[in-house]
Image (tube, coloured by chain):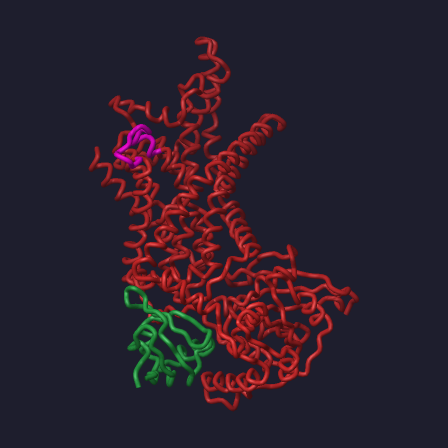
């Protein structure tokens, strides 16, 4: 178990838990569903924020928020 | 109920952002639409009508939202309208068929409220490109509502949608019993599992998402750690080049047009107060507003195209880390760029910034970035410091000074943001969760309509204030203490006969002296002691006062003030100002010290009533525009003071 901010570009995992209810709801409504695959597509040149995808959904997120997303890293 | 009411239908248009909702709205209503404000909040309300089979259908296009749990001010409006929709109102949910699962979430929430719902599936063309298939009839059967596939861009399916609205039928299913869920997260997960069951039965996803793959390839270049910033800089440079070179011709045309209009009106109206008010007050004010339309149109055209293609989201992504240091947000980049055209629509575009502190800081510092109203002032003053012939190698020195002023404005905005970041206290969490849409070609009809509405905002919001203040200033500069003006007339009537001057010459002398003894002139003389440390005299004082309506008024006021002594009216304002000398010392009045000081003053001072008004409207308090006026004034005064004393 790790958090999303620990992933490098092109690494992926499964969303297990989101530590903040407001953030969880916001991500859910934007198509990032618990139990589904999440992938780090790109990390900004200054190492923050990052672009993440889940299915066809694609959004930017800061590392402080990514830290709250617990994932199971795909091997 | 009257017969008329029976044939009236009300429709709310809702959907996720980037689903082509606005395009659909445009194809449904054509040009039968208007932009207003939702009561109490500063969110644009687009409404329109269409007629179909004897019915008049009124549509409100609600701001895009992901769910009925609102995050921004825009989304709160949608939430409120949907919740309060009456039984007769039909909610049309627009969904992107290539992202069905997420788009259906909003649908299930609205259906569970017991509203009358029609589902529209947009982007059907992309579905075919991706080799994906959907069984529309099955989906409609499972949901129990009408499902209309459309391609909003080419208007396919629009008449079927009109049919479904007018002949509404449904027997909807229920998804989730809210009371049985512990919290909103559980409820949403339950909705998704229900949606999954439905989507599995009617959606065949054997294909691949070609658009996303293309987007990834483009992103590799556009958000590259080196090329990314480089390309952004090149785009910015190109935009500014284009704005300065392309818009000069239509601007001259508009100016000339208003001069002819003024002359024509002066000719047909009976001479007197009304004539003078119309020509020198209203027409002059309107000219000052319309002359900026070419620049504003061009700049907004570029910004809207960059937004529509999806590139602006990437720029925000690249800039977020940098702007965050200054208490701003990646999303601040759009208002900060727009403000180079005009601060009024720029400040209105800060609404997408959900964090209140970041939004306030963006609003407070944006006017420090030079807008197009400063250009005529800069151009005139720069030509006094640097005569045209001066070149420094390949660089044009005038151009360099102009660039320097833009740079100073931008740096000042960042420094001010940094100060405000430490002054404004906020416990609200800041985040940068923003959808990265796939790249696509701009939809030209939408681009056109967006430009139209932005320019409309400028013309009406900024325009009415500029015209109103122009009229006040006309009064102040046309009237003075009662007998002063009469004495001037008498004095020149005598001089005219003595020195054999022409009517035109006398007229110029009279108007200059009248301005000096008018109320505006008195104000100029009153503030002279305050602005003397900056190297300004009372004439500049008058211009500072008159240009409070809008900065470019400075040039016009200077033209009137210096019309004295130029018999044939052969010299330009620039030449007249170059010749001006200090009465006491005999030295050049517009020395480099005075001119540079004046340039900095115009770069920093809040000389714009329209901006203050829009800041008041957006922050809903007098506090913020007042703070803005004072801090920018202090900044302008002290930097001008310093520059004057360094160069004097």
Q: Is B476 located above or below residue B124 in the figure?
A: above
> Chain drawn green, letter?
A
Q: Is residue B394 magenta?
A: yes
Left or right: B476 as drawn, with respect to B232:
right
Q: Is B447 located above or below residue B286 in the figure?
A: below
On the image, the x and y values in percent for residue B84 come to: 60, 73
Is residue B630 in view?
yes
Is residue B358 in view?
no
Q: Is A47 located above or below residue B197 in the figure?
A: above
Total label count? Answer: 0
Rendering colour (chain B) = red
Pick the quarter of the image with the N terminus of chain B. Answer: bottom right
On the image, the x and y values in percent for residue B81 come to: 58, 70
Q: Residue at x 46, y 37 (%)?
A: B248
Task: Tell me where the magenta segment starts and ends, as one range.
Answer: B381-396
Residue lying farthest to the left in this orientation: B646
Pick the quarter of the image with the C terminus of chain B. Answer: top left
Depth check, front residue: B210 or B533: B210
Q: Is residue B564 magenta?
A: no
Q: Is B33 located above or below residue B216 in the figure?
A: above
On the image, the x and y values in percent for residue B40 come to: 52, 63
Write down the quadrant of residue B426 in the picture.
Answer: bottom left
On the image, the x and y values in percent for residue B572 come to: 41, 25
């Amino acid at each position: 178990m790790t958090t999303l901010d620990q992933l490098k570009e092109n690494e992926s995992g499964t969303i297990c838990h989101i530590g903040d209810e407001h953030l969880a709801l916001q991500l859910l409504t934007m198509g990032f569903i618990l139990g589904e695959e999440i992938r780090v597509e790109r990390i900004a040149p200054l190492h923050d924020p990052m672009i993440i995808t889940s299915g066809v959904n694609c959004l930017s997120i800061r590392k402080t928020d990514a830290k709250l997303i617990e994932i199971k890293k795909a091997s | 109920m009257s017969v008329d009411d029976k044939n009236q239908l009300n429709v709310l248009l809702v959907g996720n952002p980037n689903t082509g909702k606005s395009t659909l709205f445009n194809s449904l209503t054509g040009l039968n639409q208007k932009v207003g404000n939702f009561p109490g909040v500063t969110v644009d309300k687009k409404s329109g009508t269409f007629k179909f089979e004897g019915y008049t259908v009124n549509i409100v296009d609600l701001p895009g939202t992901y769910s009925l749990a609102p995050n921004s001010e825009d989304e709160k409006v949608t939430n409120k309208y949907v919740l309060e929709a009456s039984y007769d109102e039909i909610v049309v949910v627009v969904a992107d068929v290539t992202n069905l699962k997420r788009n259906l979430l909003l649908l299930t929430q609205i259906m569970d409220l017991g509203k009358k719902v029609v589902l529209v599936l947009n982007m059907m063309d992309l579905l075919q490109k991706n080799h994906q298939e959907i069984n529309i009839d099955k989906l409609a059967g499972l949901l129990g509502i009408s499902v209309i596939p459309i391609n909003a861009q080419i208007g396919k399916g629009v008449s079927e949608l009109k049919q479904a609205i007018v002949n509404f039928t449904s027997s909807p299913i229920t998804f989730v019993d809210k009371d049985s869920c512990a919290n909103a997260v559980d409820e949403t997960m339950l909705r998704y599992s229900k949606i999954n069951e439905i989507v599995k039965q009617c959606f065949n996803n054997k294909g691949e998402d070609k658009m996303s793959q293309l987007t990834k390839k483009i992103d590799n270049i556009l958000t590259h750690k080196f090329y990314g910033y480089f390309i952004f800089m090149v785009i910015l440079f190109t935009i500014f080049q284009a704005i300065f070179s392309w818009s000069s011709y239509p601007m001259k045309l508009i100016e000339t047009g208003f001069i002819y209009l003024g002359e024509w009106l002066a000719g047909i109206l009976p001479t007197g107060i009304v004539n003078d008010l119309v020509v020198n007050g209203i027409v002059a004010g309107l000219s000052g507003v319309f002359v900026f339309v070419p620049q504003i149109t061009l700049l907004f055209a570029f910004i809207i195209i960059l937004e529509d293609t999806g590139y602006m989201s990437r720029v925000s992504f690249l800039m977020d880390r940098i702007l965050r240091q200054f208490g701003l947000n990646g999303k601040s980049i759009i208002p900060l760029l727009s403000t180079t055209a005009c601060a009024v629509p720029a400040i209105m575009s800060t609404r997408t910034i959900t964090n209140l502190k970041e939004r306030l800081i963006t609003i407070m510092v944006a006017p420090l970035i030079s807008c197009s109203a400063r250009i005529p002032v800069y151009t005139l003053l720069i030509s006094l410091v640097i005569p045209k012939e001066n070149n420094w190698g390949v660089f044009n020195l005038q151009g360099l000074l102009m660039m320097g002023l833009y740079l100073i404005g931008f740096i000042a905005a960042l420094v001010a943001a940094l100060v405000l970041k430490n002054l404004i206290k906020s416990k609200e969490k800041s985040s940068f969760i923003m959808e990265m849409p796939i790249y696509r070609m701009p939809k030209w009809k939408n681009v056109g309509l967006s430009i139209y509405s932005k320019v409309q905002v400028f013309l009406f919001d900024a325009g009415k204030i500029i015209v109103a203040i122009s009229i006040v200033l006309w009064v102040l500069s046309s009237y003075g203490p009662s007998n002063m003006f009469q004495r001037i007339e008498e004095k020149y009537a005598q001089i005219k006969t003595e020195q054999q001057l022409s009517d035109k010459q006398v007229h110029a002398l009279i108007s200059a002296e009248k301005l000096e003894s008018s109320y505006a002139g008195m104000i100029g003389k009153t503030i002279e002691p305050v602005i003397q440390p900056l190297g300004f005299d009372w004439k500049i004082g008058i211009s500072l006062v008159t240009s409070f309506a809008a900065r470019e008024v400075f040039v016009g006021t200077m033209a009137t003030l210096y019309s004295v002594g130029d018999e044939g009216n052969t010299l330009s304002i620039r030449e007249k100002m170059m010749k001006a000398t200090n009465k006491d010392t005999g030295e050049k009045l517009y020395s480099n010290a005075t001119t540079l000081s004046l340039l900095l003053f115009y770069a920093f001072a809040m000389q714009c009533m329209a901006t203050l008004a829009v800041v008041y409207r957006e922050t809903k308090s007098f506090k913020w525009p007042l703070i803005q006026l004072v801090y920018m004034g202090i900044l302008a005064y002290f930097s001008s003071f310093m520059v004057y004393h360094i160069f004097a």
